[in-house]
Structures are given as structure tokens and as C-alpha cells.
Image: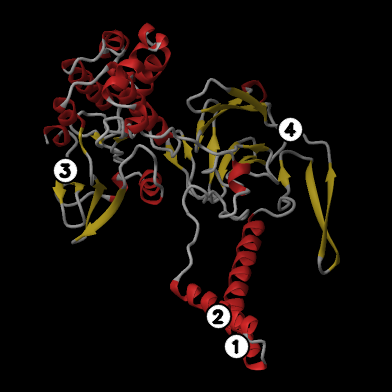
Amino acid sequence: MEFWSKFGVQVRTSTDNGPELILECEGGLKSEDVGKTQVGMLENQRIPGLLECRRDWTDSCLSLRYRVEGLRPLSSALKMKPLTPALWEGLLTALSLAVGEASQYLIKDSEVVLHPDWIWVGQDIRNVRLMAVPLRCFASPDSSYRQWNKLYDCMVENNLPEVWREALRPNQWESKTFRHLLWIDKFQSKPSGDIAKGALQDEDKKTVPAENAPCEPQFYHPPASSVIGSPIISKADDGETMRFSARSLSKDDLIRVALAAAGWIAFALYPEFLTLMAGVLGSIPLGYTLWQRYRRGEEKEAAQEAVVPAFPVPQATITGSMAERTVLLWPSPDETVALTTLLTAASKVPKARLEVEREHTDHIEWIDLTEMPFTIGRGPEQVRYRIEHAAVSRHHLDIRYKENQFFAVDLGSLNGSLRNDEPMKPNEAYPLQHGDTIRLPGTILRIQIDGSQL
């Protein structure tokens, strides 16, 4: 518990609702001390590699609860049985994947606990579950560095292979600038010669047969096109593909299906007027249910389409004595025509571009901001730049320019955005300066502005 006391919090165990860890402090946690975006992700998403978490209010005191059923601390598991080199590789791989997966949901690596007493594993030590602590007092490079030091010492005491001892040594980094991604890059870029020859895999097979080893599956983000095209997700879903599963039939639905089937089976066996009426009457409740579901789906899709109109709502943007002006004409009640007159502007939009970095890859794109507003999202329609990530909303973020200033606006996205690591409120304009960063699920945007034209 000494680990947690440094942050002014404590962790205790509870079995009221199954084995749980309760993170709290005297008088309760304060709402402003908890990252709303991060805790919302933990509550509403099942993030691979992280413990399930939920907020709890008891006697007006806020606490965080983590489920640890069927799990044990890593420090205890390492003492139970010595690990083979291949199991060490699997453990380090699972740790790095869990940290990387957390960042896909806007959880910073400094908010993930990597202390050996608070890393949780299953029967197979490669089945890793990490705690994500969305508290402002917890997330810091110095705290992450201390945790990595403790974890590294614990692994060395339990015979960490030499090839990784040198590569992952903590003293090669500074505590003030430490990030877990530093050791992850080192681990991924330094495979041992024994691994390349396949010796470690063969050694591991002697102890744990590959076909019987319950290893953690690889994390995978399906492209947006494959998710949208699946039969259980509607096209109108806006970033909900990571949140909602397929809806199962209720008991009432099953009864309606059974009544309709029984009526028509009876008519097939005994084709009489009474059995025909039984089939028709039995089908009415089922037909009504299907019609209600279709109507709700149509209403939802219409609501989603209404969020972003066919063309942006015209606004006169005055940048000097001359400006761009838009006039609306209504030839008929159901038709709107936008007539735009472009006049020579006294001042032009400065040259700017976005540096787009996909997290945990070396892929970087440069996108010129030539037209405003510049809409970013999963699309596929009415966006100027597409991000094919299932947690990104169809219309996620706008970059706008007004009165010699660039702005970023989150368009009410489900999973939110971060500007310079601070959560953005929906539909609120945030000024952008040269070098500012905006984080969306799986993507980092950096704005580069040509200062000579400002």
C-alpha cells in the first residue's frame, strides 16, 4: 500500500460484488481530479489488456472499482514458477500490447500501472490485465519511471534473460521525460538471436504445448468499412462500433416468433379458415415489433444525417474590407440552393497543414489545410480527411479559421478529443497555435502554421 500512499489514495479489496479493488481517498475522490474522457472510456469500453473499471458513489464519496476475478498479482505469479525465455517474451509482449491498446482509447501510458504488485495476470502469465488510473495526481513521467524501475528489478530477480536486461535497463532514460513507449520501442526493436533461430519456441514447447497454451489473442482494430458492413452494426452508428454488441432477442420477441410459427404450421397441416386466421393473428404482434424496430432505425439514421447538413451552414466570414458572402435562395419549400459570391479578400488564410501520426506506427502524413472548415472523421461522406478507426465518429472534428485564428471544434463525437492532452468540450471552439496537438482515437494531429503570413 506504500505505493499508493505517495499519491494520496489507497486501494483495498472487496468481495461484495465479486473480487474487486477499490481505489479511494479519505473524503472521497473529487470529480475534477478524475479525467472524464478516460474514465468514460474505461466504463463504456471493454479495452483488451485493461481491468474493467467503474465509478461508484457511496455516501456521496467517489471511488473507482476494478474487477480482478480469476487474476493474481504478477509479483506472486513470478514466485510460483520460473519462466522460460519464450514465456518472458510473451509476458513483455502482452505488457507492451496492453499499454499500446490503452492509448487507442485516449488513455496516456503514464495512467497505466506497471508496478509488479499491481499488474494482474491469469493462469497463463501472458494473460495480462493492467489498471488504468485516470487521476491527475497519478499520471506523471516520474511516477512511470519509478514503476518501471520496480518492475525491472522484480523481473531481474526472477531471471529475466540477459538479452533484455541490457536493452530494458531503466538508467538509460531520465525520470523527467520517461514514457513507457521508450522501453516498448527497445523491446520491439531488439529480438535475441535465439528467438530468430527458433530455439526459445522449441524450449517453451517442452513445458507448455502450443495448442494448449491459453495465450492472450492479438489486438486488432478492424477497418471502418468492415465494421460498418457487418450485419450487427448500423451505418448510422457514430463511433459506437467499439461500444455496443448485437442485440439479442428478448423473451417477448421469442414468444411472438413462436406464436406466428405455430399459427402457420397449423395452417400448413390443416388448411382451414380457422387455422388461416390463427396464422394471421399470430403474425400481427411480430409484424408490429419489426415495424417499430425499422422506424427507430430510420429515426436514428435521420438524426445522424441531420448532424452535418449536405453543405455547411453558410456564415459570412469577414477578414477585411471584402469577404466571402453566401446567399440562400428557396425556389420551393423542399429545395434550398446556396449561391456563393467570392470576392477578393483583403487578407488570406495563412498556409497551414496537419502532421498526422498513426500511434505506434512510423507512418506520418502531411495534409494541407486549404479549405475551411476542414472536417475530420470516419466518414465516408462529408469529410475532408478520413480516419479508419472504429472508435472515431463519422464527423469527429472540425478545423476552422476565423478572424486570423485557427480553431478546433469537437463535433459532439462519442469518444471525445484531446487538445494538448486536455479534454475538449463538444461543439466548443478551441484556438490553435503552431505546434498544438489534437489526439483522436489511434491518431495524433499536430498543426503547423506558417507564421510569416499571420
Inspect the image, locate mark 4, and give the three-letter code of the amino acid beneath it: Ser
Q: Which residue is label 3 attached to?
A: 11
Q: Which mark is residue 278?
A: 1
**Does 130 sit left or right of 436 as displayed?**
left
Above or below residue 303? Residue 404 is above
- Dot 2 corresponds to which residue? 262
- Near mark 4 (Cα within 10 A), the count class, few <14, some 14-19 or many ≥20, is some
Q: Which mark is residue 347?
A: 4
The answer to whether the residue labelled 2 contacts the one labelled 4, judged by CB atoms less than 8 Å apart, is no
Q: Nearer the viewer, residue 348 or 287?
A: 287
Q: Can residue 173 be seen? A: yes
- Tell us which disc is closer to us: 4 or 3: 3
Look at the image and tell me in which quarter the N terminus lies.
top left
Horizontal and vertical percent for residue 13? 15, 47
Residue 88 in percent (x, y) is at 29, 20
Name the kind of residue labelled 1 in the image: Ala
- Specify the quadrant that holds the C terminus: top right
* Mark 1 neighbour class, 10 Å CA radius: few under 14, some 14 to 19, many 20 or more: some
What distance separates the C-alpha of mark 3 from that of mark 1? 62 Å
Q: Tell which residue pokes out farthest to the right in this image.
A: 331
Query: Which element is circle 4 on?
Result: loop
Q: Residue at x 30, y 30 (%)?
A: 126
SS under mark 2: helix
Q: Are marks 1 and 2 in contact (CB under 8 Å)?
A: yes
Q: Nearer the viewer, residue 315 or 264?
A: 264
Whether residue 378 can be seen here: no
Viewer-side residue, 317 vs 233: 233
Distance (Cα) linking label 3 and label 2: 57 Å
As measured in the structure, the alpha-carbon distance from the residue carrying label 4 to the one carrying label 3 is: 58 Å
